[in-house]
Image (cartoon, helix red, strand yellow):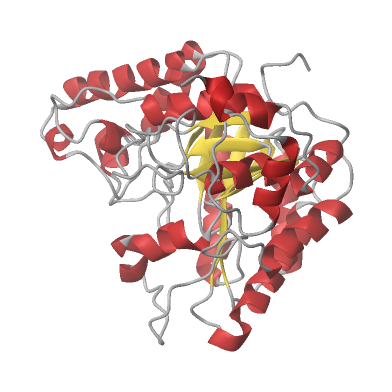
Amino acid sequence: MSADDLKLSRREVLIGAAACLAPVPWSFDALAQVPVTSPAEVARIKGIVLGANVDPFEMKDSQGVLGTNVDPFKMRDAQSWAILSKYYRGVTSQASLDFAVQRPTYTQPLRFHFTDVLAKFARARDFDFRIRPMVWWARVPAWFVGLDNAAAKEEWLSYVRTSVSRYRGQATSIECPFEAIDEDGFGLRKDAYYIRMFGEQALDLFYNTAREADPSARLVYSEHALEYAALKNDRRRLAVLRLLERLLKRKVPIDTLGIEGHLWTGQLFNEGRFRSFLAEVAAMGLEIHITELDCADFNSPDHRRDLDVAAEYARFLRIVLDEPKVTRIYTHGMSDQYSWINRTKFYAEFGGRRADGLPQRPLPFDNDYRPKPAFDAITEALTNAPPRGPVKSSKYTAE
């Protein structure tokens, strides 16, 4: 069977995307020919990219292992791909390029299939394409911990070079959610293995290596828990500002601060302090990306939680989109069914369970890919955002 045999008509794609998206055969070529009007197109005109961080589970990899059996030319369940195509203009893999995921054992060969699929999808759709060859404090390969500093440095940076070079000239941004700041904002994390091993120089090593491997991509440092008004959030914002100042003073090639945007309903929010933080980052000459947007609802009763989540999206986006240096908004997934909040023990252990035991509804689409009030909140916020000017969202077309 050829790719042409699997092509969809324009009507098939639009009907499928509009009404719960019953599974249909499709191809990249067919999707590339479909003109799409969506919040992401509104965002593009304003100079903003609306994207999604996706993973193999959401993109219908039946094994859920790094996309090893994902082939969109042959897939019959196209819901997630059609939603991505219709409503977004950017894509990256959530964690498939995580060092610990790629190298769980010393002898494990690197597996890039899923990210390769996303890169191909991005080319077909003229999407913003990002990569996240990340090191995360909460996930470190056991074999890596046993190495001395010199061997660990060589293994880690070799992986960074390999993964970044593979997508050189394709990725617009290279993001690493180091989350290097202590949870309470008192300096650097003491529980981050990379920081314990290399100190703050871990960031220098990563970003200098990434810049050598791809000189044209934007380099993003991402951090969480910067949004709210608790004293620890104030300390964390200040600690991030001081960290960025030190990195820039050392000429570490960071171009962008990534604010993860893991929101919660029912939290205290200080608009003035958050606006000031965004302005201080912008004054450093950095872009700002929202890199993992979602909203936990464990503080909201079941009958009201979709509206509470939407209100939290609206409140947050109204502020961040007022800052002209905010140019990327990436949701951390698309459908509630595949949210990390519902699928990972880490989030539950962090204190994010609902008292009634129900799965949370943190994303723009429900389990059946129907738009929720959160989707409407994102659309309205982008519609009302001050324009930055038209933007080309990918590197495949000259800007």
Q: Residue at x 89, y 48 (%)?
A: 386
Q: Residue 340: give x, y in percent of width and height.
A: 42, 57
Name the image quarter holding residue 84: top right
Q: Residue at x 14, y 27 (%)?
A: 106
How many circles with numbers are drawn on the protein? 0
The answer to whether residue 124 is above or below residue 350 is above
Q: Residue 393: give x, y in percent of width and height.
A: 72, 29
Q: Residue at x 67, y 16 (%)?
A: 396
104 displayed left or right of 187 = left
Q: Residue 147: give x, y in percent of width and height.
A: 13, 29
Name the image quarter holding residue 261: bottom right
Instruction: Please indicate, yes or no, whether residue 249 appears anywhere in the rendered image.
Output: no
Quadrant (top left, top right, bottom left, bottom right) of the C terminus = top right
189 displayed left or right of 36 = left
Towards the viewer: 56 or 204 = 56
Towards the viewer: 73 or 204 = 73
